[in-house]
Amino acid sequence: DTAVSQTPKYLVTQMGNDKSIKCEQNLGHDTMYWYKQDSKKFLKIMFSYNNKELIINETVPNRFSPKSPDKAHLNLHINSLELGDSAVYFCASSQRGEDQPQHFGDGTRLSIL
Amino acid sequence: GQNIDQPTEMTATEGAIVQINCTYQTSGFNGLFWYQQHAGEAPTFLSYNVLDGLEEKGRFSSFLSRSKGYSYLLLKELQMKDSASYLCAVISIKAAGNKLTFGGGTRVLVKP
């Protein structure tokens, strides 16, 4: 039943490690997104994909690499994790169109030790 | 660039009305969303405005003035479960596609 699901929900790891977060949506949406919400609760767009194609990349360090194997999946791989990467990462999806609301996953809480 | 301002925190009493203001400056404005986010949960869609005026949806209403770069979210008959953060977000047209930019959120605390 879950519309946008992301795994894992919690991720605790050491600085310098590489980790991945997976996201899947069963809403039939064409567009998927990754957002980062920091400790001050600002929600910032990182990437946007439409039908497996990258359309927005918001000056994110190239340690972050999104991958969209099909339009229902958008995974996020992070290399060489740093302390500043600690945040909640949200995946979202929407239909095409500026009036279409985005549906968010429950978030992945990433803590770097 | 884009600038979206909203108050950090507001407190109100159960049964009362609260108005959360949002001002924005952006190029290529293409609409404004309000989302609700309970602590530790995902943001959920509340409303969308693209034309000037008031959109009403049950206890929640949202207003937009494009000329003033201003919106508000009105919550009526407040309930304890309305305690949450309310995020104002502007969608703007970019060369690559539409981009949604969020304000910092307004945390609303409803007291008995």
Image (spheres, coloured by chain):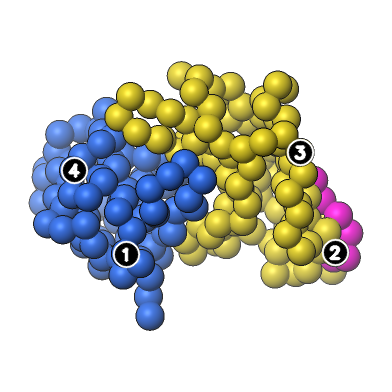
Residue tagged 4: A53
Residue tagged 2: B77
Give the mark nearer the N terminus: 1 vs 4.
Answer: 1
Residue tagged 1: A28
Placement of A103 over or under A87, stated as above or below: below
Residue at 39% from the left image edge and 54% from the top image edge: A94
Callout 3 amino acid: Gly
Q: Looking at the picture, do discs 2 and 1 lie on one chain? A: no
User: What chain is colored blue?
Assistant: A
- Camera-side residue of A27 and A88: A27
Residue B17: in magenta span: yes
Q: Residue furthest bottom?
A: A1
Q: Looking at the picture, do discs 4 and 2 lie on one chain? A: no
Q: Position of residue B95 (x, y in %)?
A: 33, 24
Q: Nearer the viewer, mark 3 or mark 2?
A: 3
**Is the Cβ of the residue at disc 2 closer than 8 Å to that at disc 1?**
no
Q: Which chain carries label 1?
A: A
Q: Which chain carries label 2?
A: B
**Is the Cβ of the residue at disc 3 closer than 8 Å to that at disc 2?**
no
- State the mark number for residue B53: 3
Q: Mark 3 lies on which chain?
A: B
Range drawn in magenta: B14-19
Q: Position of residue B14 (x, y in %)?
A: 85, 65
> Badge 1 local density, few (<14 within 10 Å), some, or many (20+)?
few
